[in-house]
Image (cartoon, rainbow, N blue to C red):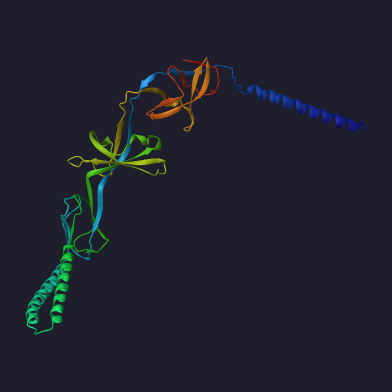
Amino acid sequence: MKKTIIYIVLAIALVALVAIRLKSNKETMDSRVYHYNKEQAINVQAISLKLESVNNSKSYAGTFEPNKETKISADIQGKINSVLADVGSVVRKGESLVQLDNALLKFQLQAIEIQIEGLEADVKRYAVLANADAIQGVQLEKAGLGLRSAKVQKATLIEQISKTSIKAPFNGIVTAKLTEEGAFAAPGIPLLQITDISILRFTVNVPESELYHFKQNEICSLTADVYPETVLSGKVIMTGSKANIGNSFPVHFSVINTADLKIKSGMFGKVNLTNTSEEKAIIIPASSIVGTNIQPQVYTIKEGKAILKNVTISDRFQNKAIVSEGLIENDVIIINGFINLFDGANVNYK
């Protein structure tokens, strides 16, 4: 009985010792944890707003592409006798570039011309005899049909011979040579690539919120990155109707190249937009905006407290934003010191 009482007392003492130790540990941990005082004023940086002139410039990077580019091939098959242009050659529309072997076609043309001469003589002879009732009219009719058929064959051969000379479809530069003399040409097999860079197409990708800057047929200034001193004029010819993966839209410009064609296909460039409007608006640093893109917010200061306000952003440029609603002149907004800041917090600012 005495042993049982001793065991009970020891168990109670052990439990009490553990409880005291746990309480001591909790007090130690609590003393080490930082407890933020929400009543303590937070040091921030702030500015007073004024109406400013909206005179911002924007630039969008893009790529120059050829206005026209094609790979030419033969309409008929045949051995290539000569290639009359090389990479870098400047060619004019209608200029012969590749000549196919047409000797056999010319022999066939000579044969059909001889046949036509004979048929024409037959038609004249049968016409005299038919008028004298010496032969039936059907013979004259057959000779006439044969003559017409031979003339169609002649026209077909002349067209085939013309197609053995492959010509440039437009003015341009040969940018790829895909065959050599002695090779065999066939329909659909590319022989040369012709590129026209006298007129270029410049393409930029624009976020949907800034697409309104570009209007059909509007003229904008462009520059190539390697020739920043050369300013080109670009006319908006198309704005995309479908967004790409980055949720931006392609905008295409038609650009007349320099006289010496120094802007090449594949070069990078920029389209530069300048807003010369004298309108004034509230302009704030982009770094002062909190919240989301859907609902941007800023902290204003009123009577020593931070007040979170919803704003409407009408445009952004560089590191600034134009506010159309939510702020007025002389409002004070916080631009730095957002750590631990909350709506209604006491603040000290300068």
Q: Is residue 20 above or below residue 257?
A: above
- 66 relative position to 2: left or right: left
Quick one: 141 or 23, which is closer to the camera? 141
- Outermost residue toward the bottom? 134
**Figure quadrant of residue 111:** bottom left
Residue depicted at x 49% and y 19%: 44
**Figure quadrant of residue 31:** top right
Residue depicted at x 49% and y 20%: 300
Q: Is residue 301 above or below residue 196?
A: above
Quick one: 211 or 81, which is closer to the camera? 211
- 184 relative position to 50: left or right: left
Can you give x and y, in whole percent of width and height, for residue 73 in the image?
Answer: 24, 59
Residue depicted at x 13% and y 81%: 137
Considering the image in quadrants, where does the N terminus appear?
A: top right
Q: Is residue 133 above or below residue 207?
A: below
**Figure quadrant of residue 285:** top left
- Outermost residue toward the right? 1
Can you give x and y, in whole percent of width and height, for residue 299 in the image?
Answer: 49, 22
Residue depicted at x 52% and y 15%: 304
Disc tally is 0
Can you give x and y, in whole percent of width and height, for residue 257 in the image?
Answer: 21, 41
Can you give x and y, in whole percent of width and height, for residue 99 in the image?
Answer: 16, 61
Quick one: 324 or 86, which is closer to the camera? 324
